[in-house]
Image: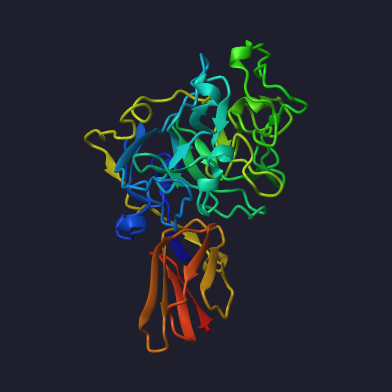
Amino acid sequence: MMAAVTLQSHSQVGPDITSWIRNTTATGYGGFVTNVQLVQYDATDVFISASCIPGYDIGPWPGDPNVPSNLNFVYKITRNPVPNTGTLTAVGLGHVGVWTNGVSIFNTQDAMSYNNLGKWNQNAYVFEGSSFDNCLGHPAPGGEYHHHVSPKCLYTITDSTHHSPIIGYAFDGYPVYGAYGYTDTNGTGGIKRMRSSFQLRTGMVHRDTLPDGTVLTPAQYGPDVSSTYPLGSYQEDYNFVAGSGDLDVHNGRWCKTSDYPAGTYCYFVTLDSALLPQYPYTIGLTYYGIVQAGNTGPGGGHNTPPGGTTVYSGTTSVAQVDPKAFSAEIFPNPATYYVNLFIQPIVSNNFTVTIADDAGKTVFTQKNIQPAILYSLPVSNIPTGVYIMSITNETISYSQKVVITK
């Protein structure tokens, strides 16, 4: 027997609509509703209503006095992105895109520069990294929780055998994928980790010239390279070397994927061989495409959808998927404090996980579980015993025995 998984015609509903992690009830940090609350679309744009609070656990943020708030963003993403053939748009401060859970994407900078001259701009990963939580995010003044680098709790950064999922969209409308892609841009070849083409300016001791060769006056010099200001501390410590990696100056490339079989431009987040964030981390210093008004600048991200938009409910025409294709890894088992859950990539999402005792009483529930993301489910408050974990959505039901020990 085949299990039904809902999909709609690509011409009507594409990944720019279906990739978002939707939730209207589950709460997270501060008791705020998490992830994306509403997806609306028309022929030209998708409107993403989100709290900017993720579904995974966040905090603490050592040394960061800010706390996350519900920002009630309504981001507008064009459905018809266009390459920018004119003067490229710089990726500025603040949000430059949105992850699929409604959390903001920030660029490489932390808004500070050496002696406030704007010549040597601080790398947020270096200067603010100590305040990042386990998921590599932190809140900005005003409460905007965000990631400057690959959000390691949003997808499985260790899965090097599958093409990474779409984990966000930049404000020019092009998708942002995780760290792994096809070797060949035509969607063939093996899977490989996408490498940035930005390289450290090795051999530099004095910060007296910019990457483009501009010679600075002494008053504009940055600090000499040292243990206090190691190479990589500033954006200008990197130079783009075409062909040295897999990606272009925007940290992306044109390619075919299962989401875009005809091909599209794609950004990738970048990790090094140790799976640590690799500069420029998400989107490069400029966008590839034309950026719409409404998301950036003061007050950006609070758009008003026009009348006549369609609310995406997830109910679409029916396609068939073999239930044998569903596979979930549940470990450790027996477990004491946490049970890790990883659902192998499948064309179905928004699962609810429940754990029930032998009398059928539910002792644990978590909604909006997505494939290809590793979850750690807390079970320390569940008494010792044998339980049934169920993983279900509208079309798939799966269960497995789990043992809790103390």
Q: Is residue 335 left or right of residue 47?
A: right
Q: Position of residue 46 (x, y in %)?
A: 36, 37
Q: Is residue 234 left or right of residue 32?
A: right
Q: Is residue 376 left or right of residue 103?
A: right
Q: Position of residue 192 (x, y in %)?
A: 70, 45
148 shown above or below 405: above
Which colouring convention does the figure follow?
rainbow
Q: Position of residue 189 (x, y in %)?
A: 72, 44
- Is 153 or 14 nearer to us in this picture? 153
Which quadrant would residue 80 be assigned to in this image? Answer: top left
Q: Residue at x 24, y 33 (%)?
A: 306
Q: Residue at x 67, y 17 (%)?
A: 208
- Is 107 or 330 nearer to us in this picture? 107
- Is 30 or 61 nearer to us in this picture? 61
Residue 77 showing in the rendered view: yes
Which quadrant would residue 39 be assigned to in this image? Answer: top left
Q: Position of residue 50 (x, y in %)?
A: 34, 46
Q: Residue at x 62, y 43 (%)?
A: 277
338 shown above or below 116: below
255 shown above or below 86: below
